[in-house]
Image (spheres, coloured by chain):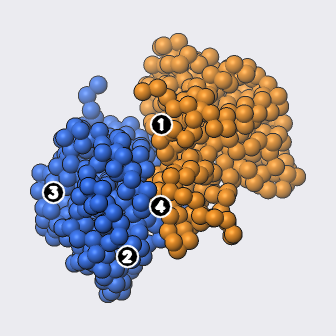
Chain colours: A orange, B blue
Amino acid sequence: MSDPSTLAQLPTPALLIDEPVFAANMGTMSAALPRSALRPHVKAFKSTDIARRLVQAGHEKFCAATIRELEGMARAGFGTDLLLANEVLDCSRLGRLVDGGANITVAIDSPETLRAAVDGALTDVLIDVEVGLPRCGCSVDDAGRLADEARSVGLNVRGVMGYEGHLMMVADPDERRGRVERSMTKLLTAHEAVGGDIVSAGGTGTYAVNTWATEIQAGSYLLMDTQYATLEVPFEIAMTVLATVISVSRKGWFVVDAGLKAFGMDHGNPTYPEGELLFCSDEHATLKPAEGDPMPAVGDRVRLLPAHVDPTVARHEQFWVHDGEAVLDRWPIDLRHW
Amino acid sequence: MSDPSTLAQLPTPALLIDEPVFAANMGTMSAALPRSALRPHVKAFKSTDIARRLVQAGHEKFCAATIRELEGMARAGFGTDLLLANEVLDCSRLGRLVDGGANITVAIDSPETLRAAVDGALTDVLIDVEVGLPRCGCSVDDAGRLADEARSVGLNVRGVMGYEGHLMMVADPDERRGRVERSMTKLLTAHEAVGGDIVSAGGTGTYAVNTWATEIQAGSYLLMDTQYATLEVPFEIAMTVLATVISVSRKGWFVVDAGLKAFGMDHGNPTYPEGELLFCSDEHATLKPAEGDPMPAVGDRVRLLPAHVDPTVARHEQFWVHDGEAVLDRWPIDLRHW
């Protein structure tokens, strides 16, 4: 069967990318952070088709959150400079990518993860530093010692990374800038002790104010979601879920065939812009029209806006890329799972 | 590579099924609702390996929430009596299953979904009746007319279904029983007007009190989750997510490599029974030990309990079936997507 050529022909639920919006988002970021100033984060889109467009826009180095993401990127030929921006204990799969010709760097924050990098036959590491988010990363005070230990066993320490994830959603831009500065001051202190060329940090929420990092790790800006859209960032929502009206009640609600299995729900329900979303079930959402608007008919299509881009992407097999009603392309979401 | 033989060898995050607990859950339900009294709901486990065990336990008819689930069930040879317990507009894929020899019944609740069944060359339908949950289903008053209309165009109307999903989590058993009775009274009224042999309803939360349905649609009881475990039901949690400690902070928290992409998050965070889960990121959870307990070491393994079984299952490629530390089997989750 040939791929559908219009939105009306798509089986639902279908994950859509509005191509003009996507292209504008990509262009805006690539203008702000050209080439190696941006290290796009694969975890937000999990698709080598999107990675290809980023390469065409001048970005050759990527970061990722899972080994599977890096395996797929290397296999697709995007192995110029791949960073696993997470700690990992079994680095043997990463070592096989190096054997295959990819350049792999892994984050380490402890003697154990250092040892894992050596055992996996990796050569390049970044020292991951905790800069305020209670998650991974060694303390600033330990960073230099860990770098020394890494170099003493033959590893190439390329620099530091530190993710200020707790500051992505600070609403006030001045407060966000001030807190990012304090967070990055920690990272720069660690960098003084560690050395190397790289200070890797940031994300879609802080890319414009984080002027201390040598490279920004951002990915959500390409597709966006309703939470990021509350920030003053120059990116628009490019990703929606297309659903079909399967039932209409005389009591004032109607039901579509996209439920919570089609969305990342950790930031709450998706948004129905033309009315109200009452609740989600596994494979349904119950909606109602805006006050005064007519009920839709069974068979009509609606589009819902996800609240969190990354886990929504991970629920689908493909993006359908469209411009208005025309379906332009199908991009497999080929970097899922672990 | 051969499959891992112990939990310690599994790559993480890994979705586990505790085989003895699973077997006990299955046995308890099959004793309460033997053979055709239960129509297991595929949406809760999405695996033909689990369906096979249910067939071996005497259950030959199934229901499902997506066309893909039915396609996989038919392909695996479980096409004796398959119910799509949802409305669907494009029934052509279901019609192809009938051509392949499967017996398919679809829920209808409107003239449009009736027409879709005819257009898809289906012959068997159930009238879906709204019994209190604001979702799909026609009104009780419309059920007879819709059945007449279906029979007038040659469809076989097998009976009614009505899902009292809003009552699954009513905590007080007496209140639950009373409200289920009122809900099922509606369904039986519709059934009088519709005819046919089937009154299909219920779920894991109401199976023991719903004595009006001729068959119960339940699936969550097999694997369970922390929300269903708050009910007084004789099923234990059989499904957990195995994760590896990848970072330990001197500030009192530690981090594992299973985050919100490994869980259905619509019922909230997973539970860490040995301590506290502070928050989930895409690929991490930040935990802390119980008061007075020692911190784990990097490389240790922990198990987390999902809050909602169905969407958690849909995030993973396979179940690893274990008994204690021994890995017994790998069951692909082969019925995902749409």
Residue B134 position (above or below residue A321): below
Q: Mark 1: few, some, or many residues within 10 Å (few <14, many ≥20)?
A: some
The chain to which mark 3 is attached is B
Q: Position of residue A301 (x, y in %)?
A: 56, 50
Q: Are marks 1 and 2 on the same chain?
A: no
What whole-number distance in Å separates the C-alpha atoms at marks 1 and 2? 38 Å
Mark 4 packing: few (<14 Cα in 10 Å), some, or many (20+)? many
Does the CB distance between marks 1 and 2 fall below 8 Å?
A: no
Query: How far apart are the alpha carbons under marks 2 and 3?
Result: 30 Å
Residue that badge 4 annotates: A247
Q: Are marks 4 and 2 on the same chain?
A: no
Q: Amino acid at mark 2?
A: Val
For disc 4, the chain is A
- Mark 2 on the same chain as mark 3: yes
Distance in Å between CA atoms under marks 3 and 1: 31 Å
Q: Secondary structure at mark 2?
A: helix
Report helix, strand or loop for mark 3. loop
Circle 4/circle 1 CB separation < 8 Å: no
Judging from the image, mark 1 belongs to the subunit labelled: A
Mark 1 — residue? A317
